[in-house]
Amino acid sequence: MAKKILVKQLKSSIKRPQNQKRTLMALGLKKIGQVVEHDATPNILGMIAKVEHLVSTEEA
């Protein structure tokens, strides 16, 4: 069973490059304060690394 990770958006995507906006949308984040749960796969961890300055993470 894969580990779960909680991802919370802390900062806005306004005035960010298009690739960062798309990464947030791909993670399922639309609003500041929104929390989503994902499996801690290499794909998801790579996406989080690209927008780590906009989100916080914790293990579930």
Image (spheres, helix red, strand yellow):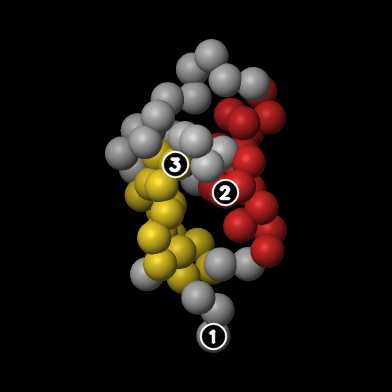
Q: Separation of disc 1 and disc 2 at Cα?
A: 20 Å
Give the crowd class for mark 3: few <14, some 14-19, many >=20 residues within 10 Å. Answer: many
Residue type, numbered disc 2: Ile
Residue at image coords 34%, 42% = 34
In the rendered image, residue 49, in percent from the top left (x then y), is placed at 60, 47
- Please identify the quadrant where the N terminus is shown: bottom right
Q: Nearer the viewer, residue 56 or 12?
A: 56
Q: Which mark is residue 55?
A: 3
Mark positioned earlier in the residue sequence (2 or 3): 2
Q: Nearer the viewer, residue 42 or 37?
A: 42
Residue type, numbered disc 3: Val
Front position among marks 1 and 3:
3
In the rendered image, residue 25, in percent from the top left (x then y), is placed at 55, 38
Q: Are marks 2 and 3 in contact (CB under 8 Å)?
A: yes
Give the crowd class for mark 2: few <14, some 14-19, many >=20 residues within 10 Å. Answer: some
Q: Separation of disc 2 and disc 3 at Cα?
A: 8 Å
**Most distant residue in the bottom direction:** 1
Residue type, numbered disc 1: Met
In the rendered image, residue 17, in percent from the top left (x then y), is placed at 64, 21
Label 2: which secondary element: helix
Q: Which mark is residue 1?
A: 1
Mark positioned earlier in the residue sequence (1 or 3): 1
Q: Separation of disc 1 and disc 3 at Cα?
A: 25 Å
**Above or below, comparing residue 41 to residue 17 in the picture:** below
Give the crowd class for mark 1: few <14, some 14-19, many >=20 residues within 10 Å. Answer: few
